[in-house]
Amino acid sequence: MREATHTDAQGRRWLVLLPEGAPDSDASMGVPIGPPSLAPLGLPVEIEVLLHNQLFDRGLIRERDLRRRMPDLAAALMAALRVNVHRIAGLYSKGVEGA
């Protein structure tokens, strides 16, 4: 078996296992290695996808990756939320006045 990457319909990037000799185009049928599904956290889908991809980009795929690099988990969470902080701040700069 070999590792390959796959991007699902929501934009999440996954590390998957494929049989030796299988083309990368078969990655959607591969066995997912990680990161794990974040669905049990109940996050909005947009945040879940951002966090999932931050974990993927930082190589936090398996439990052993996380155990060695816990500070990277916190950094991934902060990076995923930073996008939304900028979007919220943008609302203020548009001059929308509250009641």
Image (tube, rainbow, N blue to C red):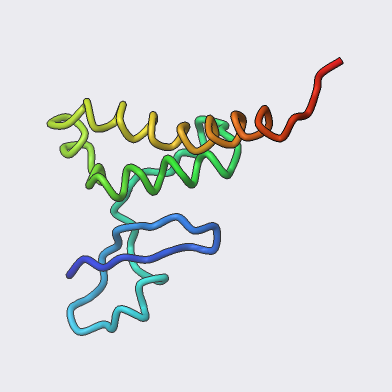
On screen, 69 above or below 11?
Answer: above
| x and y, in percent, of residue 73 in the image | 29, 31
Looking at the rendering, which quadrant does residue 17 occupy? bottom left
| x and y, in percent, of residue 96 in the image | 78, 29
Looking at the rendering, which quadrant does residue 99 occupy? top right
Q: Which residue shows up at 38% across the image and 35% down it?
A: 79
**Residue reaching furthest left?**
68
On screen, 82 above or below 59?
Answer: above
In the image: residue 63, left or right of residue 8:
left
| x and y, in percent, of residue 23 in the image | 28, 83
**Placement of the N terminus among the 4 image quadrants:** bottom left
On screen, 41 above or below 49?
Answer: above
In the image: residue 96, left or right of residue 42:
right
Of 77 and 63, the residue lying toward us: 77
| x and y, in percent, of residue 87 in the image | 59, 36
**Residue reaching furthest top?**
99
Q: Which residue shows up at 45% across the image and 55% down it?
A: 12
In the image: residue 20, left or right of residue 8:
left
Of 96 and 42, the residue lying toward us: 96
In the image: residue 93, left or right of residue 81:
right
On screen, 42 above or below 5?
Answer: above
Q: Which residue shows up at 43% across the image and 37% down it?
A: 80
Q: How many marks?
A: 0
Looking at the rendering, which quadrant does residue 30 occupy? bottom left
